[in-house]
Amino acid sequence: MPHTSTAPVKMEKVDKKTVWNNVLESIKVSVSPAIFSTWFSQTHLAGLKKGDKRYVAEIGCSSSFVKATIESRYFGLVQDSLKSELDSPCDLVFSVKDVPQKKGGDKETPSPLFDQEGKKDEEVARALARSQIRPSFTFDNFAVSSSNQMAWAAAEAVSKNPGSAYNPLFVWGGVGVGKTHIMNAVGYSLIKSGYTDKVLFCTGEVFTNDIVEGIRNKTTQDFRNKYRKLKALMVDDIQFIAGKDAVQEEFFHTFNAIVGAGGQVILTSDRPPQEISRLEERLRSRFEAGLIVDIAPPDFELRCAIIQIKAKERGIEIPTDIVQLIAGNVGSARRIEGFLIRLASEATVRKSEITEEMVQSVLGRGFETNGQGKRAEPKEVLTAVSKHYSVGKRELLGNSRARVVALPRQVLMYLLRTELNLPLQEVGKLVGDRDHTTVMHAVEKISRLTSKDPQIRQDILGIKSSL
Amino acid sequence: MKLQVLQEDFSKALTAASRFTSTRAQLPVLGNLLLKTSKNKLTISSTNLETSVSIGIGAKVEKEGEVTVPAKTIADFVNNLSPGNINLLSEKEKVQVKAEGTTSTIAGMNSSDFPSIPSSVAKDSFDLPTEDFTDALSKVLFATSVDETRPILTGVLFVFKKGEVSLVATDGFRLSQKKLKSKSITKSGVAILPKTALSEVTRTAKSETLKLSLQGKDNQAVFGVDNVVLATRVINGEFPDFEKIIPKSEDIRLRADKEEFLQAVKLSSVFAREAANIIKLTLEKGSLVVKAESSSAGSGESKLEVKIEKGEKKDLEVAFNYRFLEDLLGAIEGDEVVMSFSGPSAPGVFTDPEDADFLHLIMPVKVQG
């Protein structure tokens, strides 16, 4: 039965209180009412312990004056009453302690000075939710290097002077370079600095859907109210509206309304405006009127910084040399995130710290793919490597152990293993019928080299892009 | 007990000690003063069980002893005597007071019923410069709360750090902080002391330095100034995290003449009294406008020149309870006051440009429309 286990604890509590109440009742009889109310009414039994045959009672007094008086003048009286109440001899300890107050009451008195923090945070959180901005994407956790410095500086300027610095700000770049992050960061800092409402983040697709919805339900007016009165509009993946005439027209008017009222527009796309096909000329010219910045894929140093930021967010500690090892082998920011998750779960499963060996083994396993996108054939990789290093295919698969051949061969094995996700034995078989341990060694060696040697990083990048 | 004292000393000590007796005490002895001799001193003590005081005065002691007497009776009697020697003689529980041409016998009580109170400061005390300390208290005491349901806010928080103590008081609407340097502070710690005791300290403190010792075990703080030892209970509980609410940034910073600002506040207060004490501050072309209006009494508006040190282009509209502004301006000693604001719902920060150790926050009032 569940209540049996809790019962004794409860009994104890009741005990202390009733014991002291009974003691006080008996003291009341022996002293005058004035003495009782002055000295005893504010006391309580702070602790009661049973030692060898004797109880030790701690009596809490409201002030040191009370303590001193009871201790010196009424010690015997209290001891006797306690003894007869507990039926056992008793030692007394006195301390100055307030009667444990019942909670509550505190809340009733207003103190706006101390409530404001929470309120402000709440307001910001509400605004963030309304504007659909992800609070985890901020400038604080955005790492900057030469590849994205321009975009970062522009975004910072926009967040400080919305509507006037660069309008519109057009950010373009490949997958996972941080376009959405930087746009969210602008929105976040705008909301933080007081633009609590009238900031909206959406994707080109959501924008399209909203229009379609409006047309279908004859509520285009609602749509206009939602978008045209904004102080800042951020549209992710604007290229989605290309080729959709009605959507483009609506976006054109929305854009004019916002910019005309001094609002800020930020757009992202996977390519520059002039390359977005089937984009209306008037929209293209408007996009080109603002600042167009591109973000290149993160370089090695930036990847290191990203790894450190992400690891800190997840509370994982990774030594610098391992950070470099990962940065040398994992390409995009999303992959880094995924890799860290796997690394962290590996560490918890194995209950050990993150070591180079563990990173190697996770790296060696390659990345899971969902089968999307056409993978390169092993033959193509072979061709690419042989072309890149100008080494004949036959030599590459042959037995020569000369350095000019051995290193490209190891790169080949590394790529086959990590990029194509082939099993070790298969890789061995493909590369001149080698043992799987040879392949393991090659993968390990190259992944270590990538963290130290910029040349090999470039080689691998070049080969990958030619695939 | 038999001794001689000077009326001047005795009368002062009796008046000071009387303030610490509890007037509505159920126990009669708490309405009494304890007179006790030791060597060449007469110590006069009293307590209301929250604070206690014991004052020593010089005396010519012929026979040692101790007795308690009703505070009001003996104080009133001795105050009206003319300066000069007074003979005190106690026999059992009666005290005979004899001065030139006058004799009285006052009925006292046995001293054994009187609670024991600290009569000296412990050795681990800090030295504080009295003048600075009372000055610091005067700058924070007014911000304490009068609301007894939150006892913690009725006290002043002392935060001791090496070489420094900072005094903080708040009532939940405003907060006052003043820092004080003292080389003798070597330990860090915190204590919340009741404001009643502290204002008594400012009243009694006259010499150059005062001693303060904290007795954590007894939950007691003991002040020592000259021949006076004042002990008070320490308020239990946790002071709100005040560091957190001190704004880290500011949108607008203004510098104004204190007297002019105070006058503007006082002028507006005439109308603000009828309108929940609210006055509004706005910026108009480089001058600060102090405005108040009430539906029944009318409205008032005063302009004063201010120096805008930051945020020239920004708008300001913030409303305060004028009493808080009045209290604050009364506490600032310099000629100018610097205030910074960051929005209508963030606390206003007020500082004295001549006193870097002083900081005051006031929470604005929310006004609709």
Image: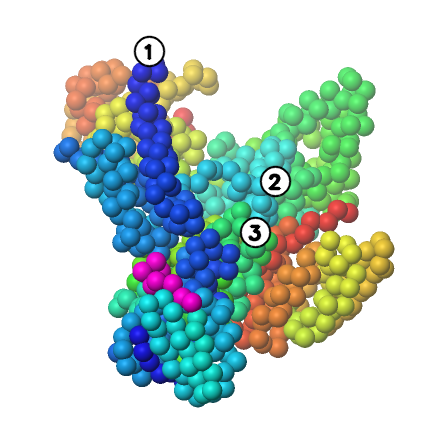
Chain on which label 2 sits? A
Q: Residue at x 72, y 56 (%)?
A: B278
Q: On screen, B205 above or below B4?
A: above
Note whether residue B202 is visible: no
Q: Which residue is mark 1?
A: A1
Secondary structure at numbered mark 3 = loop
Q: Which residue is at a point 58% across and 41% down the rendered structure image?
A: A108
Q: Is residue A219 left or right of residue A184?
A: right
Report the span colored magenta.
B107-114
Q: Position of residue A461 (x, y in %)?
A: 38, 34
Q: Nearer the viewer, residue B200 or B97?
A: B97
Q: Position of residue A21 (x, y in %)?
A: 37, 35
- Residue drawn where x is 34% and y is 37% of the image: A26
Q: Is residue A429 above or below residue A71?
A: above
Q: Nearer the viewer, residue A420 or A399?
A: A420
Amino acid type indicated by mark 1 = Met
Which label was assigned to residue A222? none
Q: Quarter-wise, where is residue B99 in the image?
A: bottom left
